[in-house]
Image: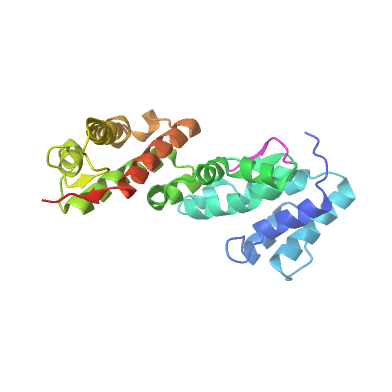
Amino acid sequence: MNYQPFSRESITAIAKAIGDTQHGLTGSEIGNLLAELHLYDPGPITKWRRLDEAFSDWQKRNGTSDRVITFLARAMHLARYADNQELFEKRRSLLNPPLAIEGMRINENGKVARAKQAESLTEIQKLTNSVKAELKRRKTHEQVLIYCEEEVLRHGYFHAILEASKSVFDRLREATSTDLDGAVLVDKALSVKNGVLAINSLATNTERNEQTGLCHLIKSISGLYRNPVAHDPRLKRDVAEEELLEALTLISYVHRRLDDAHTRNA
């Protein structure tokens, strides 16, 4: 396959990403990969400058970015990260913004893949981390992000919904000072008759219906997301990005209603 050379600016940005001081390749890893791929090695200088010179030299002499892409593919090979998924995702998050400008990305399998080319900073953010950007755009409640942000960044949608749904029940347990769970906990917290919390004055039928509606909604969250996700084997539960966003938005709404709740008089 014929790969056009990357721009000078992209080469430097890619070199800075994979040669990042904290999360990038080590000096020895860089040296080994340069030798394996017969790339020019300027020697023990700053990691990103070493890569910048090596990549630039190849493109200048050969008029293609193919060996740069091969270097990235080997650097991101899954076998390197079998015991450190967090590092894989961190490096991937560093590489994908500059690669997006060139119409490429590191996919979840560690491969360098074609992608829509980003033409603005907004598009770079959207293409490289659409979930995180969308959650922020929707102003997702902080209580939801506390429980699932790390999972979302790793694209662990399956566990993200589970952890986010737990946040509602953890909050109700704290409010009721009990270790109850499920429907019993929801009734203890929000039953119109004798619940601990109220989201309004409960003075009218409309207000009491609103309280009952929130009570049913939280029970539905348990039925829709918490219990099925907790019991389904991961490989049989494929959660798409759209479902994740919808679930987190619903759970975020519940937290906002609980923000307005007050403790009822005994």
Q: Position of residue 219 (x, y in %)?
A: 25, 33
In the displayed structure image, the side of residue 150 where residue 185 appears, left or right: left
The range drawn in magenta is 110-118
Q: Residue at x 58, y 65 (%)?
A: 22
Q: Residue at x 25, y 36 (%)?
A: 211
Residue 159 shows in this picture? no
Residue 24 versus residue 222 in the image, above or below: below
- Please tell me which residue lies in front, 10 or 187: 187
The scheme the figure's colours follow is rainbow
Q: Position of residue 192 (x, y in %)?
A: 17, 37
Question: Which image quarter holds the N terminus?
Answer: top right
Residue 77 versus residue 204 in the image, above or below: below
Q: Residue furthest front?
A: 204
**Magenta-span inclusion, residue 111:** yes
Q: Position of residue 74 (x, y in %)?
A: 64, 48
- Please tell me which residue lies in front, 21 or 125: 125
**Magenta-span inclusion, residue 98:** no
